[in-house]
């Protein structure tokens, strides 16, 4: 089995074993591509949300946050283009009976070409050492040029065919490239068809009077339809932003990558309203700001890259993804889109209500343009979780599994561990717990050897373990152990709050952005 697959398997099993993520409805054999967050997953997820909300809303004077309903007037989805165009091209393999996204098959093919190009670059970098000039190499090396040109030709042809709804050509392209079902090797494909990803439901008591509704496939439209309410009540001038965190639902065709692609998931989106003509400079600005936000987490610069879109969605005049190196390769983590005035204009047209802004400086009214940043909370969870999960061999040859989560995001900040329950150590430890619980999420554990308790907390990502022993009763000191360095220090109980806070507070994380 490939190493990548092993890593991914370990991520999935660790997430379950330590109470982060469970398959939904597991006792009924689960529900495909739906997952539940357990006690530690819910904490980690809430902390990720806080990191986003604080960075976007609290730290930007001109961005406010809302919480709009999941159910919305059905015409919204007509106006937004989702009823007519929120489709994925699907293709079935006649032999394996497996279903694929035709565009993903082609993109994966291109990703393999890019891997080959990268290998050439790495080889040359090693060969030439310090004198290696990557920019020159990628434009002159015949193989790299060929791999890159081929990708470009494929992606451009796919983009054109999808835009023209020429699905026969998408199939022809798959056949020309001899793309096979990755699991079985079969090249026996059906025609390509479009499949709408929205879930339908009904609002109302009787089937005759019920209205057809959709579960929202993105949170953005809840922001657009509230644009004027928020602008008027917040009195913000352009440019200003509206942020939102919430559930979205998509009937994904292929959903086999754990929480990377779910049918019910959460998005953290921000729509930035700007004067027409300025959108592309704000788009560049937000691309950089969002990348910096990710980099502050410390997961490694080399794990991120931009992927500028060839095929633009019906609403965009520029779009880029921030891709992250997941255990199964580089994939989209966040989308940054310049959505023009498409959405607000469409809502003006369909609702008959004006959604214009009067610009004092320009002395004119117009429909604002929008730059969107949209990140999947669950994908971010997976990025952080999988990157943090490490098996380490220690100096004495023993091994440990550690989840080196950014401390501000760790579900539990400190474990309070009395060496034993008797001799008053339990009571003393409880007192420490009761004092620190106002500031931090803690766990209290008195079972098992102290070594085992350390290991369990390492695997959970707990930044500190605090051990209470007999000396604690005499001099009010405890041992504090750092998850990452495993160093143990004797400190005064009175200093615990400050020591923990310095490492885990959001200020420390946010100031790195
Ligand atoms: P993909 O191409 O992977 O299907 P997308 O381009 O359709 O994603 P967007 O519509 O731009 O995604 O949504 C913004 C973000 O929401 C994505 O970057 C991703 O992080 C997240 N997201 C989208 N679909 C899912 C899903 N099915 N499960 C989990 N997260 C998702």
Image (tube, rainbow, N blue to C red):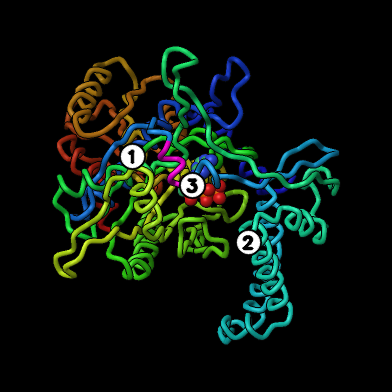
Would residue 45 be visible to someone looking at this image?
Answer: yes
Which numbered disc covers residue 159? 2
Residue appearing at x 27%, y 18% in the figure = 426
Residue 168 placement (x, y as % from top left):
76, 54
Answer left or right for 164 relative to 285.
Answer: right
Return the residue nearer the eye: 453 or 249: 249
Answer left or right for 357 relative to 156.
Answer: left
First to last magenta residue range: 75-81
Q: Earlier in the sequence, mark 3 or mark 2?
A: 3
Answer few, some or many: residues within 10 Å of disc 3's Cα (few below 14, many 20 plus, some between 14 and 19).
Answer: some
Q: Earlier in the sequence, mark 3 or mark 1?
A: 1
Q: Main secondary structure of the magenta part?
A: helix
Return the residue nearer the eye: 392 or 370: 370
Secondary structure of the residue carrying tag 2 is: helix
Secondary structure of the residue carrying tag 3 is: loop
Residue appearing at x 14%, y 65% in the figure = 360
Which numbered disc covers residue 81? 3
Residue appearing at x 29%, y 36% in the figure = 67
**Magenta highlight on residue 78:** yes
Return the residue nearer the eye: 354 or 402: 354
Would residue 388 be visible to someone looking at this image?
Answer: no
- Residue 387 in the image: above or below residue 340: above
For disc 1, the marked residue is 47
**Magenta highlight on residue 374:** no
């Amino acid at each position: 089995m490939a190493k990548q697959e092993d890593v991914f398997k370990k991520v999935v099993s660790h997430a379950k074993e330590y109470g982060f993520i469970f398959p939904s409805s597991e006792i009924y054999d689960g529900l495909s591509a739906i997952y539940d967050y357990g006690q530690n997953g819910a904490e980690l997820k809430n902390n990720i949300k806080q990191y986003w909300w604080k960075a976007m809303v609290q730290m930007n004077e001109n961005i406010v946050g809302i919480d709009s309903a999941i159910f919305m007037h059905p015409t919204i989805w007509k106006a937004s283009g989702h009823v007519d165009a929120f489709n994925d091209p699907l293709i079935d393999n006649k032999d394996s009976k497996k279903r694929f996204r035709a565009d993903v098959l082609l993109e994966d093919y291109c990703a393999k070409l890019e891997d080959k190009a990268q290998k050439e670059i790495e080889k040359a970098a090693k060969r030439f050492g310090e004198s290696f000039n990557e920019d020159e190499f990628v434009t002159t090396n015949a193989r790299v040029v060929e791999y890159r040109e081929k990708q470009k030709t494929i992606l451009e042809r796919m983009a054109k065919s999808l835009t023209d709804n020429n699905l026969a050509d998408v199939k022809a392209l798959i056949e020309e490239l001899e793309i096979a079902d990755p699991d079985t090797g079969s090249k026996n494909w059906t025609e390509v068809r479009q499949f709408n990803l929205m879930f339908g439901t009904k609002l109302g008591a009787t089937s005759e009077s019920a209205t057809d509704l959709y579960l929202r496939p993105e949170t953005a439209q809840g922001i657009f339809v509230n644009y004027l309410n928020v602008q008027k009540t917040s009195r913000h001038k352009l440019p200003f932003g509206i942020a939102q965190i919430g559930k979205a639902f998509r009937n994904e065709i292929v959903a086999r990558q754990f929480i990377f692609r779910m049918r019910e998931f959460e998005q953290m989106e921000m729509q930035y309203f700007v004067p027409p003509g300025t959108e592309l400079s704000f788009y560049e600005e937000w691309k950089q700001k969002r990348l910096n936000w990710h980099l502050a987490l410390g997961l490694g610069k080399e794990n991120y890259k931009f992927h500028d879109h060839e095929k633009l969605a019906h609403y965009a005049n520029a779009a880029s993804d921030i891709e992250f190196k997941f255990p199964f390769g580089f994939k989209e983590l966040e989308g940054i889109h310049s959505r023009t005035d498409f959405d607000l204009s469409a809502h003006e047209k369909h609702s008959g209500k004006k959604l214009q802004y009067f610009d004092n400086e320009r002395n004119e009214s117009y429909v604002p343009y929008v730059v969107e940043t949209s990140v999947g909370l669950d994908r971010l969870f997976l990025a952080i979780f999988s990157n943090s999960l490490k098996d380490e061999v220690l100096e004495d040859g023993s091994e440990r599994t550690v989840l080196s989560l950014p401390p501000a995001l760790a579900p539990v900040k400190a474990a309070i561990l009395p060496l034993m329950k008797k001799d008053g150590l339990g009571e003393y430890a409880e007192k420490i717990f009761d004092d620190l619980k106002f500031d931090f999420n803690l766990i209290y554990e008195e079972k098992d050897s102290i070594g085992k308790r350390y290991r369990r907390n390492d695997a959970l990502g707990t930044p500190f373990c605090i051990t209470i022993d007999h000396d604690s009763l005499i001099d009010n000191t405890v041992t504090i152990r750092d998850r990452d360095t495993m160093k143990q220090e004797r400190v005064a109980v009175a200093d615990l709050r400050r020591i923990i806070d310095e490492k885990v507070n959001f200020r420390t994380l946010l100031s790195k952005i």
